[in-house]
Amino acid sequence: MARLDELRREIRQRGERIVRGASIQLEEELRRTAPKVTRELERSITVRFAGGSQVLRAEAAAEADHAAPVIRGARPHVIRPKKVGGFLAFLWPGDPRGGPVRRLPDGRVLLRSVNHPGNEPNLFWRHALGRWGALLQQQAGRLG
């Protein structure tokens, strides 16, 4: 029975190393392929290893406020400031429709709202997660 317990422990340890290694690679790939307009989305991506008593898993998350509409896509919508009475600030080379409330010396314009045209889903997330099995196999191969 002691030998069986040793074998279970060894399998568990190898499994943890495989999932941890693949988690690191997945996070690197998600960050490498994420859109880099402000780099906020890229910086917000984490892949956490979660090992329970019976299950090993990794959880990928993107915490940036705009992560969901980038990853899933978005319908056209109005964007307003978070604070009532506040402004949105954009680098806007021409004059925005309706004109800016104010133009700053650095080229940014202050606006009360903008009409976002919507966007298609960015498939970087789906593509990286689709490689999860290959990343696990790659890590298992490294262990021998």
Image (cartoon, grey):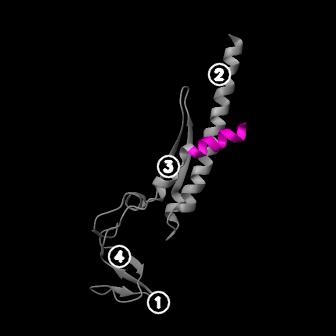
Q: Are marks 2 and 3 in contact (CB under 8 Å)?
A: no
Query: Distance between the Cα atoms at labels 3 and 1?
Result: 46 Å
Give the percent coordinates (x, y) of residue 103.
39, 88
Q: Nearer the viewer, mark 3 or mark 1?
A: 3
- Which element is circle 4 on? loop
Amino acid tagged 2: Arg
Amino acid tagged 3: Gly
Mark 1, Cα crowd under 10 Å, few <14 / some 14-19 / many 20+, is: few
Location of the N terminus by quadrant is top right
Task: Determine which residue is flagged by label 3.
Answer: 130
Give the percent coordinates (x, y) of residue 50.
55, 37
Q: Is residue 101 left or right of residue 25?
A: left
Which stretch did the figure color magenta?
Answer: 134-144
Looking at the rendered structure, which numbered label has been put on residue 134?
A: none
Looking at the rendered structure, which numbered label has been put on residue 8?
A: 2
Q: Earlier in the sequence, mark 4 or mark 2?
A: 2
Residue 135 among magenta residues: yes
Q: Give the total of numbered labels.
A: 4
Task: Determine which residue is flagged by label 1.
Answer: 105
Q: Earlier in the sequence, mark 1 or mark 2?
A: 2
Query: Distance between the Cα atoms at labels 4 and 3?
Result: 40 Å
- Which element is circle 2 on? helix
Query: Distance between the Cα atoms at labels 4 and 1?
Result: 16 Å
Amino acid tagged 1: Pro
Q: Earlier in the sequence, mark 2 or mark 3?
A: 2
Amino acid tagged 4: Phe
Give the percent coordinates (x, y) of residue 80.
31, 70
Name the residue: 49% across, 62% down: 41
Q: Are marks 4 and 2 in contact (CB under 8 Å)?
A: no
Query: Distance between the Cα atoms at labels 2 and 3?
Result: 29 Å
Classified by dominant secondary structure, the portion drawn in magenta counts as helix
